[in-house]
Image (tube, grey):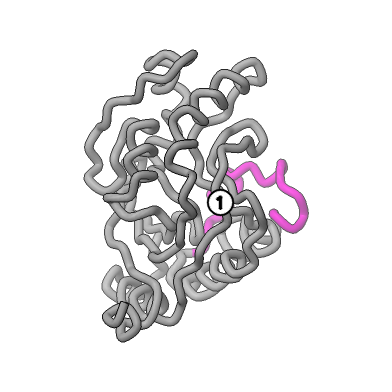
Amino acid sequence: MRYAIYFTPPPGDPLTHAASAWLGRNVFSDLPVDHPVVPGLGLHEIAFHTALPRRAGFHATFKAPFRLAEGQTEASLLNRLMRFAGTVEPIALPRLEVARLGDFYGLLLSNACPQLDHLAASVVQEFDAFRAPFSEAEIERRSPEGLSAPQFANLYRWGHPYVMDEFRFHMTLTGPLLAKDFQRVEAALRHQFDPVLQDRLAVANLALFVEREPGAPFQVHSLHPLGRISVRKIA
């Protein structure tokens, strides 16, 4: 079993509904969802382009998937996560927008958000004691030859290349695309997501995801609201 600490909107959020339909799977229930009918892109094309993010589920990564270190348990991880979440206040994000990152598309921030970068780095550091170190074979499977020097150092130190100064908040919506497909896929994504991106999103929870066996889809195990309990009760 592997665990990951992500952000994903709550199950009733309009963005969750839009993403579940686009990806073809609800990350809370693990049930399939019908793809939307969008201009210019067939249902079979959506299914093909979303195969990779469908298994991962709709999320933004803070602590990448890890196996528990020797001596750690799910109960101890949950206890630490609940306590940590209570020390962090919710963060109102800049507007999200459909954008391309390399050869895939996702939802990215329209402006920088230093508070979010700080939270992401804090999660990586706070929960690293729960992560079993990678073997050399596991390092090699992550294609380190394609990484920059800082990314390679992050992979060894933190188990993921894109953390700390290399972190960029994104919520993946496609697998790798060919350049000839960029325009059509982007138009379809805007049709699906622009209506639900008018309202700003807040990072108001940390989500524990689980992969119950190798190759299984990642699913939400539990949501952990940010902020002090006393403040949340008043609100």
The overriding secondary structure of the stretch rendered in magenta is helix
| Quarter of the figure with the N terminus | bottom left
Between 137 and 46, which is closer to the camera in this rendering? 46
Q: Can you give x and y, in whole percent of width and height, for residue 59 in the image?
A: 43, 49
- Secondary structure at numbered mark 1: loop
Q: Position of residue 20 (x, y in %)?
A: 34, 37
**Which one is in front, 201 or 144?**
201
Residue ID at (47%, 27%): 191
Q: Amino acid at mark 1?
A: Arg
For label 1, the crowd category at 10 Å Cα-Cα, with few meaning under 14, some 14 to 19 and many 20 or more, is some
Could you tell me which residue is drawn at 32 percent across and 40 percent down? 17
Res 155 seen here: no
Q: Quadrant of the C terminus?
A: bottom left
* Residue drawn 77% across the image and 55% down it: 149
Whether residue 193 appears in magenta in the rendering, the answer is no
Give coordinates of residue 88: x percent, y percent. Answer: 46, 77
Q: Residue furthest bottom?
A: 230
**Can you say whether 17 is above or below 71 in the image?**
above
Q: Which residues are magenta?
A: 133-151
Residue 201 location in percent, x, y? 46, 55
Q: Residue at x 76, y 50 (%)?
A: 148
Above or below 222: residue 107: above
In the rendered view, does 132 fall on the left or right side of 11?
right
Residue closest to the eye, 195 or 103: 195
Q: Residue under circle 1?
A: 95
Location of residue 44 by image quarter: top left
Q: Is residue 88 visible?
A: yes
Q: Is residue 63 above or below residue 85?
A: above
Is 123 positioned to the left or the right of 15 in the image? right
